[in-house]
Amino acid sequence: MNNISFDDFMKVEICVGTILSAEINNNLNNPAIVLTIDFGKKIGIKKSSAQLIANYTCDSLVKKQILAVVNFAPRQVGKIISEVLVLGLSDNNNQPVLISPDSNIKNGKKLY
């Protein structure tokens, strides 16, 4: 494991957002779901492509609050620009399960 400094960790902005829409993207080698996520006034609405099909339907994702890294450089995923990295953990089948707060949090609040 490589150690990083606390200052390096503080550079990573992990914020909460609410998923506004979710659409399947079958135009990739591994089908994914394109998420449109509201991170509040300061950060705004961002898109992300995530391979969530094993554990989620599009309908189950709408209105769900999730955590994401909001200050990575945008990344091309197929024809989509993924603007944020949604965060999750692997289940027993090595498929992502999103990290979500237990109660409703104001969009854009930063993890500390």
Image (cartoon, grey):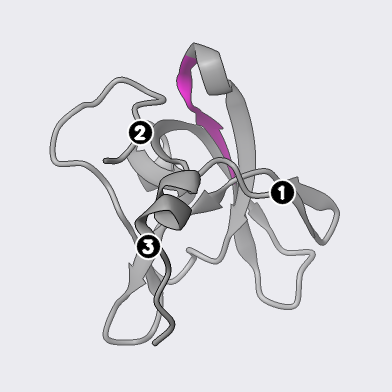
Q: Secondary structure at mark 1?
A: loop
Mark 3 burial class by Cα count in 10 Å: few <14, some 14-19, many 20+: some
Q: Is 23 covered by the magenta stretch? A: no
On-image quarter of the C terminus = top left
The residue that label 1 is drawn on is: 73
Mark 1 burial class by Cα count in 10 Å: few <14, some 14-19, many 20+: few
- Residue 63, x across and y down, in percent: 37, 31
The residue that label 3 is drawn on is: 88
Residue at horizontal 72%, vertical 64%? 26
Magenta residue span: 35-40
- Which of the marked residues, 2 or 3, is nearer the chain's N terminus? 3
Q: In this rendering, is residue 104 above or below 11? A: above
The residue that label 2 is drawn on is: 110
- Residue 99, x across and y down, in percent: 30, 54
**Mark 2 residue type:** Lys
> From mark 2 to mark 3, how far is it between C-alphas?
16 Å
